[in-house]
Amino acid sequence: MSSNAVPSYLFAVALRSWRLFITVTKIMLPVMVVVQIAQEFGLVDLVGQFIAPAMALLNLPPEAGIIWATTLLTGIYGGIASLSGLAGTLDMTAGQFSALCAMMLIAHSIPVEQAIVRKAGAGFGVTSLLRIGTAAVYGAAVSWACYLTGALADPISFEWLRGSSVAAGGASAGYLGWIQATAFSLALTYIIILALVLVLDGMDRLGMTRRITRALTPVLRVSGLDPDVAPVTTVGVLLGLTYGGALIIEEAAKQNFSARTRFLALSWLSLSHSLIEDTLLMVALGADIWIVLVGRVAITLAIVAILARVTRRGQGTEAPVAA
């Protein structure tokens, strides 16, 4: 890369990151405002009391339920905004936080993403319940396993999300302090997005993304996926459910995939997608990569393999299609 090309490349990366940042800010900022208003009126405490028993079964604090509920409705960045807003009250170990992050990765943006899944040929309700149920079971298993074994028992601090000095000032500076803390959180989000864009672009240029794609294809086939749908499913697993779902819609029209084939592929995508970008984001926040990546892929493989076995009898037409 020439000396003139370097500034041009950095400017292009910064511009792309800025566009992505504006997109996620439109999601994050309203959530941060709502969380702050809810805190002012004591609604966060009320919601926390209401969901505390359910979260206790998962060995997670009530605030984790608020964060996950926000994530289910608005997506990963909405959940991060809620996390940032509740940073001063959260008390979690590294194991609990990793469990929460895994739950967020498995089940998020349900209204939007499962609408795409329905369009691609699998039932909205079935795949939504699959995602939410798997997230809850996996999160509980991770959190309780860490608690019982003492693994990842160190407490994790969230003050860096808002800046310890800014957050401290915000406690006494009222709304001005909140504005400063929110600005800090958004600036930090831009830095994380910029870093992710650089890492992902570097992986593409080095051919790492292609190698990961080739490595994942046999894994998907082992789970019982039709070899014809495995390649496009792999692309969605790496790049996201929206893109993967669109590819399956396109390929289904060309190759006339059966209902069972589409259901299994879309179940894979529903449980594990954006393996690179979203995983890196959660690891940057402090999650354990073995839990949010390796464990998530393993449980997805196991569940899809079970679904493949259960639906094999009706392979031709019988599968939970759009509903």
Image (cartoon, rainbow, N blue to C red):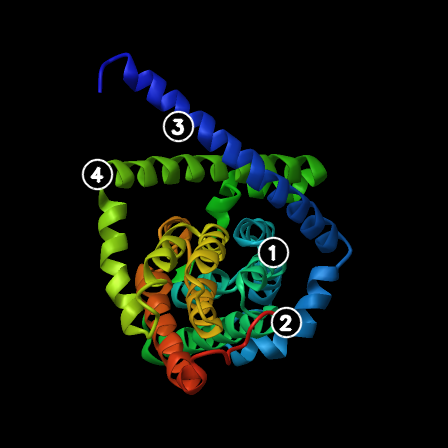
Q: Secondary structure at mark 2?
A: loop
Q: Position of residue 118 (x, y in %)?
A: 58, 64
- Vertical order, 163 against 291 (above or below): above
Q: Earlier in the sequence, mark 3 or mark 2?
A: 3
Q: Nearer the viewer, mark 3 or mark 2?
A: 2
Q: Position of residue 128 (x, y in %)?
A: 57, 69
- Vertical order, 132 against 313 (above or below): above
Q: Earlier in the sequence, mark 3 or mark 4?
A: 3
Estimate the spatial distance between the alpha carbons at disc 1 and disc 3, rounded to whole Å: 28 Å
Q: Relative to 209, is 284 on the left or the right? A: right
Q: CB atoms at circles 4 and 1 under 8 Å apart?
A: no
Residue count near mark 1 (Cα–Cα under 10 Å), binned few <14, some 14–19, many ≥20: some
Q: Quadrant of the C terminus?
A: bottom right
Closest to the observer: 158 or 266? 266
Residue count near mark 3 (Cα–Cα under 10 Å), binned few <14, some 14–19, many ≥20: some
Rendering quarter of residue 273: bottom left
Q: Earlier in the sequence, mark 1 or mark 2?
A: 1
Q: Which mark is residue 13?
A: 3
Q: Nearer the viewer, mark 1 or mark 2?
A: 2
Q: Residue under circle 4?
A: 206
Residue 50 can be seen, yes or no: yes
Estimate the spatial distance between the alpha carbons at disc 3 and disc 2, rounded to whole Å: 41 Å
Q: Residue under circle 2?
A: 323
Closest to the observer: 183 or 19? 19
Q: Earlier in the sequence, mark 4 or mark 1?
A: 1
Q: Secondary structure at mark 1?
A: helix
